[in-house]
Amino acid sequence: MSDSIDEAFSLGRRNMDKAIDHLKDELFKLRTGKASPAMLNGIIVDYYGTPTPLNQAANLSTPDSKTISIQPWDKKLLSSIEQAIFAANLGLTPMNDGEFVRITIPPLTEERRKDLVKVAKSHSEDAKVSIRNERQKMIQIIKSEVKDGFPEDQGKRKEAEVQNIVKAYGESINKLIEIKEVEIMTV
């Protein structure tokens, strides 16, 4: 067995796992009509001149299924948090009461739900493209090794193995999307 083929398989699987993890992160951020602090992941607040993730500058909680409550460690950050949420363009309206910033999650319309399903499917297609790119890299390495003397029949088996790996990752992506679609479309 060629070491470069083993390395290609190892690297390919790691990169495919990263594609799945990235997809899960993107799907987790999609709003499903229920409040979740994860909806605010990626929001950066100006914390005394330092760009800081919101979850490191405030306590995020969900007192009920329709509300996100943000309690900053320092009350002077309230307006900065509000501005950062508006700037993130999430379609959410923060309300500052002097102690907390509260965000009420509006119910999703049927049209918005369908748009979110499209976004989820777009993310899944991006993940599938990443996996197909890894497949191409792995197969190129196998073909290169066959040219350099690796047995051709073993090379064909390795290519079939790559195809089975890609198929398994594709099925995993499809399951994630099916689950998210049901979650989004459930009223």
Image (spheres, helix red, strand yellow):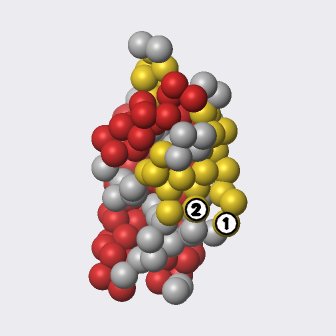
Relative vertical location of residue 13 with respect to residue 58 in this rendering, above or below: below
Q: Which residue is mark 1?
A: 64
The one nearer the camera, 138 or 96, is 96
Residue 35, by quadrant, is bottom right
Vertical side of 135 occupied by 44: above or below: above
Q: Name the element at disc 1.
A: strand
Residue under circle 2? 67
What is the x, y in percent for residue 131?
43, 52
Residues at discs 1 and 2 in contact (Cβ within 8 Å)? yes
Q: Amino acid at mark 2?
A: Thr
Q: Position of residue 60 (x, y in %)?
A: 63, 44
Residue sitting farthest toward the front: 98
Along the viewing direction, whichever of 61 and 17 lies nearer the viewer: 61
Give, as a three-letter code, the residue at label 1: Asp
Quarter of the image for residue 125 reads bottom left
How many neighbours does mark 2 have within 10 angstroms: few (below 14), some (14-19), or many (20 or more)? some
Query: Residue at (39%, 55%) from the top-left corner?
Result: 93
| Whole-percent x, y for residue 28 in the image | 54, 57
